[in-house]
Image (cartoon, helix red, strand yellow):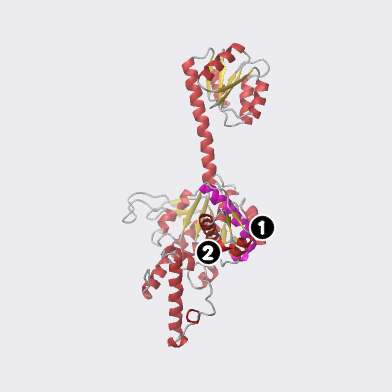
């Protein structure tokens, strides 16, 4: 039921409006002066205010201005027996939803009230949705490494300095990039993300810089690239180490000149973009191998932020686990489950090759499969650690390998590689993309290995 406040120094008007609105099932309160009306607005949650303009103790326009200062989203309908076009315009300029003359027409009053309430609801819903969509997860952890990352973000974010974020898959590089944008002067502009590893090399240039109609076979219309889309904001280039040489050269030019050219186009387009890049590779080694341009590396790495793997910040596992428990249980609409100290110790002992991403997945699995309190037995039964458990010392057949079967070192390497890839594929239920990500090789490379070793599902 909507709650409405009437502010008017005429008792007859207040009584009439109250009677009409209560008949329509609105909850109504009234007061005879603006000052007390402001106090009521500050103390209560109203959905709408009907306010007279000409009052003795405080003018209605002042009430409107100060009321909106207290509750910016509160709709005001101004009413007056001396209404003019100028008064209506001034009321609208100060933020009033509408203006009604005395004596009010019943139908117009009810329609205006309904529209104002609908508009107020939409404003609130929109703000809630925006908060949900744009909400950036906090960077959780009390370790020295995380404290240093947060301090660096606070120092660097307000500048336009380019940042290179390094770290293993699942360690939280994207979260660092989001906070760099969120705390920057560009936070009201878009943050555009590009996963360079997920886009085929022949399409990466079109993705980044756009293309003109007819520039290649499937270019049936003009396309705006990510650089243009991020104009005024931040461009996050994830997995920059997987970018082709041709695209690297164009990105370098864009960073040097703040200009781009669409594929198939000739016109230079100026762009104002802050670039944050991330990679799980050692770019210095990639430079030595000839896979990455040194000049681009130096352009991107004005500021370097390294996100440590979870194994280097095991003390943060308790905080992260509790946060995931609260978050996931709330998503599922269930009471938050407890976790024993022994279970936390068991989690800390795991290898965590998938880092934070793997920890969240494990916590979700434990929530689903465990009882009210998660125990260390649940962790051992359900957590599915990334590394295989060591074989029993009594099981000589599985713990030892007959090295006499290998003629040379290459044969043994092939055998070890085949068994390792087979184990990872089975662990990931033969999800090739996830396995490639897990063992840090390109998906096409993994397909070649599967074909080379004749690996088959259910083997």
Residue at image location 42% in from the left, 49% down from the top: 224
What residue do we see at 54% from left, 39% from top?
128
Between discs 2 and 1, the one toward the N terminus? 1
Instruction: Point out residue 185 in the picture as x, y percentages from the top left corner.
Output: 59, 47
Question: Is residue 139 visible from the viewing direction of this image?
Answer: no
- Residue 286 placed where, x, y %? 51, 70
Nearest the camera: 178 or 433? 433
Which residue lies most toward the left here? Answer: 217
Label 1 near label 2: C-beta < 8 Å? no
Dot 1 corresponds to which residue? 142
Name the residue: 45% across, 71% down.
Answer: 423
Q: Nearer the viewer, mark 2 or mark 1?
A: 2
Q: Nearer the viewer, residue 24 or 39?
A: 24
Q: Please tell me whether mark 1 sits on a helix, a strand or a loop.
A: loop
Where does label 2 land, which residue?
381
Residue located 34% across and 51% down the image: 213
The image shows residue 434, relative to residue 21, as above or below, that is below
Magenta-highlighted residues: 311-332
Q: Tell me if I can see residue 325 in this picture.
A: yes
Tell whether position 323 is magenta. Answer: yes
Q: Is residue 318 magenta?
A: yes
Give the camera-side residue of 19 and 46: 19
> Where residue 354 sits in the image (x, y, percent)?
53, 63
In the rendered image of this protein, does residue 131 appear above or below residue 249?
above
Q: Is residue 432 shown left or right of residue 25?
A: left
């Amino acid at each position: 039921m909507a709650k409405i406040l009437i502010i008017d120094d005429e008792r007859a008007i207040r009584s009439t409006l109250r009677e009409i609105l209560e008949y329509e099932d609105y909850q109504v309160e009234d007061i005879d002066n603006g000052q007390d009306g402001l106090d009521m607005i500050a103390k209560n949650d109203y959905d709408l205010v009907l306010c007279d303009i000409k009052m003795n103790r405080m003018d209605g326009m002042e009430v409107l201005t100060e009321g909106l200062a207290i509750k910016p989203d509160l709709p005001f309908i101004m009413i007056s027996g001396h209404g003019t076009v100028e008064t209506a315009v001034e009321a609208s300029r100060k933020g009033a939803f509408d203006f009604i003359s005395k004596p009010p027409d019943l139908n117009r009053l009810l329609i205006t009230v309904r529209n104002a309430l609908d508009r107020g609801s939409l404003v609130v819903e929109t703000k809630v949705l925006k908060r949900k969509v744009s909400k950036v997860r906090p960077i959780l952890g009390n370790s020295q490494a995380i404290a240093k990352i947060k301090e660096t973000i606070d120092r660097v974010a307000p500048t336009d300095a380019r940042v290179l974020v390094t770290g293993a898959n699942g360690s939280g590089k994207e979260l660092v990039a989001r906070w760099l944008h969120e705390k920057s002067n560009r936070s009201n502009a878009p943050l555009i993300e590009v996963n360079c590893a997920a886009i085929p090399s022949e399409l990466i240039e079109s993705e980044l810089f756009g293309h003109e109609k007819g520039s290649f076979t499937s270019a049936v219309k003009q396309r705006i690239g990510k650089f243009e889309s991020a104009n005024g904001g931040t461009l996050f280039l994830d997995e920059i180490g997987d970018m082709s040489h041709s695209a690297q050269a164009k990105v370098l030019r864009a960073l040097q000149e703040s200009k781009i050219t669409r594929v198939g186009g000739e016109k230079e387009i100026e762009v104002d973009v802050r670039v944050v890049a991330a990679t799980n590779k050692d770019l210095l080694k990639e430079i030595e191998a000839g896979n990455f341009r040194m000049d681009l590396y130096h352009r991107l790495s004005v500021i370097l932020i390294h996100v440590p793997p979870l194994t280097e910040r095991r003390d943060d596992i308790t905080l992260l686990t509790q946060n995931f428990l609260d978050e996931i249980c709330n998503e599922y609409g269930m009471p938050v489950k407890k976790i024993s100290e022994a279970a936390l110790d068991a989690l800390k002992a795991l290898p965590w090759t998938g880092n934070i991403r793997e920890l969240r997945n494990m916590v979700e699995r434990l929530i689903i499969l465990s009882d009210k309190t998660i125990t260390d037995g649940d962790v051992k039964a359900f957590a599915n650690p990334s590394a295989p458990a060591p074989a029993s010392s009594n099981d000589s057949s599985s713990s030892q390998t007959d090295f006499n079967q290998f003629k040379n070192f290459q044969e043994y390497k092939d055998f070890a590689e085949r068994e390792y890839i087979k184990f990872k594929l089975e662990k990931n239920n033969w999800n090739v993309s996830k396995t490639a990500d897990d063992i840090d090789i390109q998906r096409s490379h993994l397909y070649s290995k599967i074909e080379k070793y004749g690996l088959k599902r259910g083997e």
